[in-house]
Every structure is written in structure tokens, then in C-alpha cells.
Amino acid sequence: MGSNGIRRYGLYIGGRWVAAAGAEVFPVHNPATGEVVGEVADARAADAVQAVTAAVEAFPAWAARPAKERSEVLRRAYDLMLAHRDELAELMTREQGKPLEEARGEVQYAADFVLWNSEEAKRVYGETIPASHADKRLLALRQPVGVVAAITPWNFPAAMITRKIGPALAAGCTVIVKPAEQTPLTACRLAELFAEAGLPAGALNVVPTTRPEEVADALLADTRVRKLTFTGSTGVGKILMRKAADTVKRVSLELGGHAPFLVFDDADVERAAREVAASKFRNAGQTCVCTNRVYVHERIADAFTAALADVVRGLKVGNGLEPGVQIGPLIDGQAADKVERHVRDALAKGARLALGGQRRSDSARGVHFFEPTILCNVTDDMVIMQEETFGPVVPVQVFRTEEEAVAKANRTPYGLAAYLYTRDLSRAIRVSEQLEYGIVGVNDGLPSVAQAPFGGFKESGIGREGGKYGMEEYLEIKYVSIRL
């Protein structure tokens, strides 16, 4: 860290901090204030190739380490993350903007992936298969995939990294992480902590860049990289998937969402409103699983909207480092433009503004906030009901029947997360089974945990992260037939 409090990092390759090939660096800004909070090396394609080489060289020894030893390294990394929880949280808030208390929660969530996978490392079991002949023995072995390229987003700078490197390292893989250019500092600090935990040089490499396509292309073209794991937009995911096909890499893709929240007429209105708010406004609505569309039964629509407005009206907007702030800034001007465009389109087509609706921007400093917003009288032709907003806006639409609500919820190419609120057990089971989503929260707006599978249906992704399912994404199955 520099004398002025600005963190400075190179590229982390082969266990060393090195300058980028072009000796270029780029600044990292606090989205709440516009101030520079860090400076990191700006990787090029050549740096990505160098990182792959380091990961390839480290792979045989790391894969050969007994699972118990890999487990111990990850457990130490978990302990270090919690020991530095406040530091990591403040760093995250400074570079990403989320409220400090949310950032502390993310550190715990991120650390939980490391802990869970440290334990799962010791439970990668093979299998003996009954043979067809007395003189044969058939074995199914599980072995690490190899070198992994992990491309992570800015909205969860710690958890989206550990959700990938936790199982990858536990399985015996080595990893190159390309963090989002908005939030590379957390990735670099995590690399330091994993090294302190005893992770060998080259097992984890970090290559920040302002040229994501160039670096990603280098990683995808390299035949030594055997797996791609990516969290981000569906559009970018499709491009990466096509490019990964050229070398037949395994892929895990956690892509965009457009989560519906169905509130039925038997719901506890006030509790349902609190769950919707908890889901929608976490990280200023900048999460892939947050509520994007609310469908409320016509009999309780007015009462629900009033209850939701009461909750949302009390949310404080501001710099995430300030006490009591619950809604931080949007990540950049492009994000704010999208939110504003969705709101204006809805209002132009007849939506009613129940609360909020205003953008607060200081473009000179690159600072963009948006008030927590509730829109009523929303119709299907509005853009906000067709695209993921990724901001603090709740569109509310009324429904009459359960069948109508389920049909509306499923009428999208996305299928990451969905929610419903009801006190009817039969309905809860029936609707959760009909929703075409990889994650369903029943009376639960915050279902994500490290030990459960996270992933989507349809165009929301391929594969799962979390729990035993996340580990399977980094393991190959080898069949061995032995004649005695």
C-alpha cells in the first residue's frame, strides 16, 4: 500500500508480483466518491500466457498433494480471511460501493466457500464397478481437470472468486483468475492471503486487465487451459462458450437472471414485503439473483404495495462507508443509464411511480446513485419486464390465478432464481416444481449458501457452484480396467 493509502498491485504470476508486459497500470475508483483507491498492472495476452505456464508448472505437484494437505491449506486461507474480515470488507466497499455491513457479510460468504471445499477435498471418492469377468477389476477414478481459467464479475469481488477457486484448488486444479476491471483489489488481496496460507507458487494466478477480450482470448486459445468458469452476462457467456468450443474446454457458466417473485393472496403481506426488499435491494439491486419482477395477487396488491413502500422508504442511500447506509452507488454511468432507461420506458408506457425514480449523478467524478424505486401498473410490453435491470427498481404487476402467475414467471429465456411467498404448503411445492429456475426461494428472499447448488436453467448458465456439486465441475472421471 502506498503512503497515500492507495493500494498498488502487479500481476500475481507464479507466486510473484510482476509488472505487465507493457508496463502499463490502471486506476481503481471508488464508485461512491470517484476517488482513486488503487492501481494495478494492466495485463496483456502475453501475461495471460505467462500465467498459464505458471499454472501448468504448478499443477502436477499440487494435484499430487494428498487431499488432507490441500484441505489444510484451504482451511488456513479460511482462517486468514476471517482474521482480515474488516480489512477485506472495507476494501470491497471502497472499490465496489456496497454498504460496509453487506461487505462484511460477503467476506463470510466468500470464506464459507473456502471452508466447505477444504472439507470436500477429503471426500473425492472413486468407485469399484462389478466386472463381467473373474480376471478383471474395474475402477472409476476422479482426478482434477487441470488448469482452470476463472473470469469473475464486479458485483461480488470476493465471493465470486472463492466460489470458483475453492473447489478448483480443493480438487487439485491450478487457476488463473481474471477479475473484473472495476474490482481487482479484492482479488489481489485474496491472492496474498492464500499465499500466506501456504498455497504453492503458481497454483493461483491473478491477471487484472482493462483488455478483457484480449486476455480472455489468450486463455481460451491456449490448449493447456482445460476449463473455463465464468460469471457474468448471458451475452458474454455465449461468446466465451463459442470460443471455448475450439479447444473443447469444459465450461461452467453462471449467467444473467430475471428473477420473478410471486406473492399469493394467502401471504403475510408485511413479511412478504420485507423478503422482496431484502432480495431486491441487496447491493443496490446489482445481483444476478435479486428480484426483478414482482407478481402480486390482485386481492392483496394494494396492501402489499403499501407495505413494500413503507419498507423501502426507510432505506438510506449513500457512501457505503457511512453509518446506516443500505443502498450504495451503481457501479458506473453505464449501469445508471440502463436503470434510468428502464424506468423512463415504464413510465412512458403507463406505469405509475409509487416511490423513488430519481437518479443522482455527478458525472464529473463518475458517481452514480439511484433512489430505491417502486413501479406499479406495470405491463409485459415494458422493457423492465423483459430485461434484467441490475438496479434498485421493483416493478409490480397483478395476477389473478396461480396458473397465470407461473406462466408469466416462466415467460423468459432466463432461469436462474425465482421466489414465491405463500402459507399454503401444497401450493409451495406445486409452484416451486413448475418454476423453470435453478434456484427457488419459498418464503425466502436470500437462499444462497455455500453448501447448496447455485446455477440456472435455460440461458442462465451451465453447471453448478456450491456444495458437492461445485466440486464435481473440476473433476474428470477416469475408467481403469485391470486384467489380473
Image (spheres, rainbow, N blue to C red):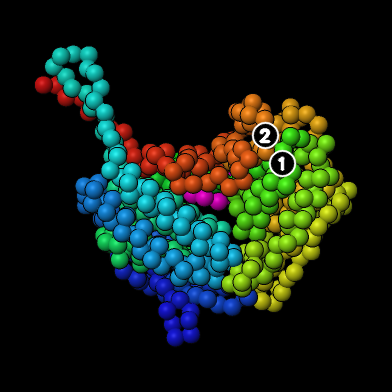
Q: Amino acid at mark 2?
A: Arg
Quarter of the rendering containing residue 469: top left
Q: Is residue 214 above or below residue 94?
A: above
Residue at 60 percent across and 53 percent down: it is 287
**Residue identifier under label 1:** 268
Q: Position of residue 20 (x, y in %)?
A: 40, 70
Residue at 24 percent across and 25 percent down: it is 128
Q: Inspect this view and state whether residue 203 appears.
A: no
Q: Is residue 265 magenta?
A: no
Q: Secondary structure at mark 1?
A: loop
Q: Which residues are magenta?
A: 230-234
Between 59 and 31, which is closer to the camera in this rendering? 31
Asked if the residue under mark 2 is in contact with the one under mark 1, i.e. CB atoms within 8 Å, the reply is yes
Residue 423, numbered circle:
2
Q: Amino acid at mark 1?
A: Asp
Q: Is residue 276 left or right of residue 10?
A: right
Q: Is residue 408 above or below residue 164?
A: above
Q: Is residue 289 left or right of residue 476?
A: right
Quarter of the rendering containing residue 47: bottom left
Quarter of the rendering containing residue 411: top right
